Amino acid sequence: MMIIRTAQIHDTPAIVELWTETNLLRPWNKHERDIEQALSTETSTILVAEIENKLIGTIMAGYDGHRGWIYYLAIEPEYQGNGYGKQLVQAAEEWLKSRGAPKIHLLTRKGNEAVQKFYAKIGYGISDVTVMEKVIEENIDVPSPINFHNQQEVEEWVRNTVEKRPYRPEFFAAFAASINIFSEKPLNILEIGSGPGHLAKHILENCNIKHYTLLDFSAPMHQIAKNNLGQLADKATYLLRDFKSPQWIDSLGKFDVIVTMQAAHEVRHKQNISSLFLQLRKLLDDNGIFLYSDHYYTPSSKTKHPELYLTKEEQPEILEQCGFKNIVPVLDKAEMALYVAHK
């Protein structure tokens, strides 16, 4: 039996996973912020559908004082076709009606005929209006050329990375060696932007690991990582979180070691990297270490955006500004560097 309830902030990971699976996410939308803001005011909400305590559907509703609006209607694919979407829309309509909304509007992407037919069947018609927009929030982010929520694009990215960056195994080995120098005891490790799991696999095979947490904002990446790790997956946990969100570190606990490779720039502007590093420092045990590796920008770079990547000089400077100590360069190759930094 399906139940519909108001979402809570702790539902965010499950909601994002559903939106990823149903292809609702777009790289330019800050979906975790959308969830937080929708649940923080009396004029908006998110309703979720559950079956046997499993979140299988969502809808967002808001009332601007003139019209009601609905967004983010999603039903897990295996549950589609059973009327659950219609029930969620009806629940959102009741929520809006109780707040005085006389009319409800919604937006569908051009060419999405399947969604338009769904809404037409439950009483929605096409308005004779033209939607216009103006972005009033300054967005310094450098757009990503890859949609990491799209399975096909992710698989192509992984293939290209392996082919075009044959030096990566040298970095994997340097990560593992640095961890083993740090401590021989079983370690609790967090990897940020874990991607296809190549670094995780090498560390799990060559270091004394108590538990390894792979954190990424891409569900397709996690699926590839699970396949790559195979039997090593017993020591791993997969977390789907966007480390651009201010709340992504909530409830994570502490770690002996945090590692990241080719991921820090995914905050999409180098001005955002210091905020990420400050959050990572909070997650480290007092004696923990941070292993940071990423490409750096040089004037001769043809493929690296100067506002996305730090320069070689800026990389250790940012670590120091964020409070890290004993910052040691470990490897520098193909305009990519690896540093070990202590909390």
Image (cartoon, helix red, strand yellow):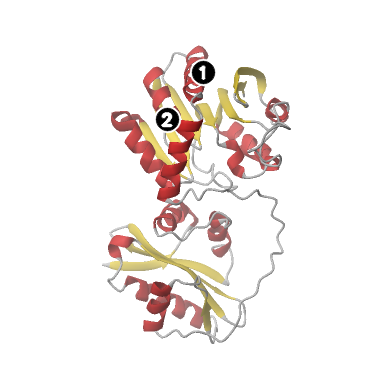
* Residue nearest the viewer, comparing 144 with 274: 144
Residue at horizontal 43%, vertical 77%? 116
* Residue nearest the viewer, comparing 290 with 125: 125
Image coordinates for residue 124, horizontal then vertical, percent: 44, 84
Depicted 59 relative to depicted 208: above or below = below
Depicted 102 relative to depicted 144: above or below = below
The disc label shown at residue 203, or none? none
Q: Is residue 118 visible?
A: yes
Q: Is residue 240 left or right of residue 141?
A: left
Give the distance between the C-alpha atoms of the residues marked 2 and 1, in whole angstroms.
13 Å
Q: Is residue 343 left or right of residue 16?
A: right
Q: Amino acid at mark 2?
A: His
Depicted 330 relative to depicted 152: above or below = above
- Quadrant location of residue 56? bottom left
* Residue nearest the viewer, comparing 321 with 302: 302
Q: Amino acid at mark 1?
A: Ala
Tag 1 residue: 174
Q: How many marks?
A: 2
Tag 2 residue: 198
Image coordinates for residue 25, horizontal then vertical, percent: 49, 58
Quadrant occupied by the N terminus: bottom left
Image coordinates for residue 92, horizontal then vertical, percent: 45, 75
Q: Is residue 231 left or right of residue 250?
A: left
Q: Is residue 286 visible?
A: no
Image coordinates for residue 206, horizontal then vertical, percent: 40, 18
Q: SS for tag 1? A: helix
Depicted 15 relative to depicted 142: above or below = below
